[in-house]
Image (cartoon, rainbow, N blue to C red):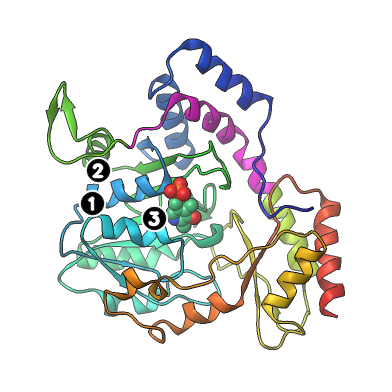
Amino acid sequence: MISLVQPLIGAEEIQAVNEVLRSGMIAQGPRVAALEQAFADYCGTRYALAVSSGTAALHSALYAAGVGLGDEVITTPFSFIATINSILFLGAKPVLVDIDRQTFNMDVNRIEAAITPRTKAILAVDLYGQPADMSPLKKLAQDHNLVIIEDAAQAVGATYKGKKTGSLGDIGCFSLYATKNMMCGEGGLITTNNQDFASAIKRFRQHGMTGPYEYAGLGCNYRLTDLQAAIAVEQLKKVDTFTRSRQDHAELLNQGLQNLPGIITPHLAANRTHAYHQYTIRITKAAALSRQELSAALTKREIGNGVYYPKPLHAYRHIANFGYSIGDFPEAELVADEVLSLPVHPALTTEQVKYVISTIRNILE
Ligand SMILES: *Cc1c(COP(=O)(O)O)cnc(C)c1O
């Protein structure tokens, strides 16, 4: 079986966890601090703060940005559910903007029309590992006094105009979930250059605490443990190697899947590098088989594959309740019916990638 995802865990991660266990200091401590320092250096930001998940990172970032009851946050209808749920936690309204079907990210030409006096922030997702188109977003944010939050959960190490994700907006959010490009089981990281945002996030992840039994406001328990941080520190040392391997596999797939009718390989927009958390093709009506048929044929031949995501987010009732219905975001609805992700992770061998290619060509030709 060629799996769709597979974490790469080496002797370094195992030894690092053992050291923490032997130290007897398990909760947030020196390993978390080391991870934060290393990750801030990696992204090129002043601050990095560790939290317990990517979802906690998004919630904390929106809280720090001042998003609250009745505010509006502009985001995409085509992402993982946590992107939008994090807006809902704060009583704010998700204002959805349709995507560009080539990059799967928000169509920047549609954003200005979605801005109202209540808009507080833009939550841009770097879907599948490709950075969102940040320059036009920054211009809009400046003109309308908005905070840009980057959901870079899938895009660690990707770049836009030479700058790393996490440093592109005002606040960057990452996930360390087991299947992400670097991982520690469950965890999250938040990057920013803004001292006020960093202080607010530090308070929020620890019950709103400002001193011993002093609380400046609402907070959660969103701390990461040193056990997890020890794993993430080792993963961070390897992440550029992982990414290069993902990019090499993607390049092989791009070449190998050329000229198959109805199959559209990923489009990399200008001035960007892609972290290929997912390698996602589109299967259009012109293809010899439907997506479902191709997926079933691959599964039968023991090639992992998956649909991220089978429904746009406005198809779920708790989000449709904000006044959305099917038909509102035709691009997101179209690609939700067409996308299929193929194995691209760094544990694959070149032979396995070539086998994936030849199998798909055999099935479709
Ligand atoms: C994984 C992911 C999240 C949530 O991260 P968790 O660590 O699972 O909470 C949020 N947004 C996107 C785009 C993701 O891929």
Label 1: element kind: loop
CA–CA distance in space, label 2 to label 3: 14 Å
Point out residue 213 in the picture as x, y percentages from the top left corner: 14, 24
Point out residue 237 in the picture as x, y percentages from the top left corner: 59, 32
Point out residue 259 in the picture as x, y percentages from the top left corner: 78, 79
Instruction: Give left or right: position of 250 versus 69.
Output: right
Does 150 lie within the magenta span? no
Q: Which residue is mark 1?
A: 65
Q: Which residue is mark 3?
A: 150
- The residue that appears at 81% across and 78% down in the rendered structure is 364
CA–CA distance in space, label 1 to label 2: 7 Å
Magenta-tinted stretch = 222-244
- The residue that appears at 41% across and 81% down in the rendered structure is 329
Quadrant occupied by the C terminus: bottom right
- The residue that appears at 19% across and 30% down in the rendered structure is 209
Point out residue 196 in the picture as x, y percentages from the top left corner: 21, 41
Q: Which residue is mark 2?
A: 197
- The disc labelled 2 sits on which kind of residue? Phe
